[in-house]
Amino acid sequence: TFLNMITGVDHLTSGDVIVRAKEEDISVHRLSEDELTLWRGKTLGIIFQSFQLLPMLTLIENVVMPMDLCGVYQPRLSRERALELLTLVELEDQAHKLPGQISGGQQQRVAIARALANDPPILVADEPTGSLDSVTADHIFDVFEHLVHDRGKTIIMVTHDNSLAPRFTRHVQIVDGEVLGGTAPAKGPRKRRMK
């Protein structure tokens, strides 16, 4: 529900969700459906727990698709960018395979590459390591740390694994729809770390 509110998938019964990205505050639920779709495509990269790759498209085609839908890059450039993103997640040699021909951990890395396709400032991840073994999950977190430290991304992640909290700059614990605790934002100069 939390991620669905941030991404505008679920409608609010009261209140407002304001997302700050690219130095602009957006009241998500006041956007029209068309505005919301465009805003999502350019501002958010969404990483689903179940990957949501299209099985009939190759890995590179899955990564190119969001770029084509938003018209962010010319077709030739979108393929080049998709290959760069698959290289970032160490899957460039698998680019022409179908999702069913690679492992679950590899599919999750393709989902991360796809989420980065339009170079969004915010990544939203729903249990991105929930179905992965510990080695693959650790590799996914290494990629996330690179994205935060070296590429300036903000990552909002939902997980049921409390042992992951120390890897984040800030965490909030929500139980049965109530905020029970968490850490305050760091004071002073902001360091880019996972959020």
Image (cartoon, grey):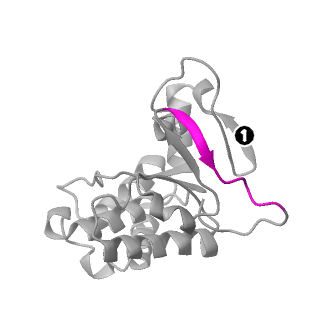
Q: Quadrant of residue 137?
A: bottom left
Residue corresponding to mark 1: 25
Q: Residue at x 73, y 55 (%)?
A: 185
- Where residue 25 sits: x, y (%)? 72, 40
Q: Nearer the viewer, residue 170 or 124?
A: 170
Residue 181 appears in the rendering: yes
Q: Is residue 50 above or below residue 7?
A: below
Count of numbered circles on the image:
1
Q: Residue at x 76, y 60 (%)?
A: 186
Q: Is residue 158 above or below residue 138?
A: above
Residue type at numbered disc 1: Asp
Q: Residue at x 32, y 72 (%)?
A: 134
Q: Quadrant of residue 111?
A: bottom left
Q: Is residue 88 magenta?
A: no
Q: In the image, which residues are magenta?
A: 177-187
- Where residue 39 sits: x, y (%)? 56, 41
Residue 83 appears in the rendering: no
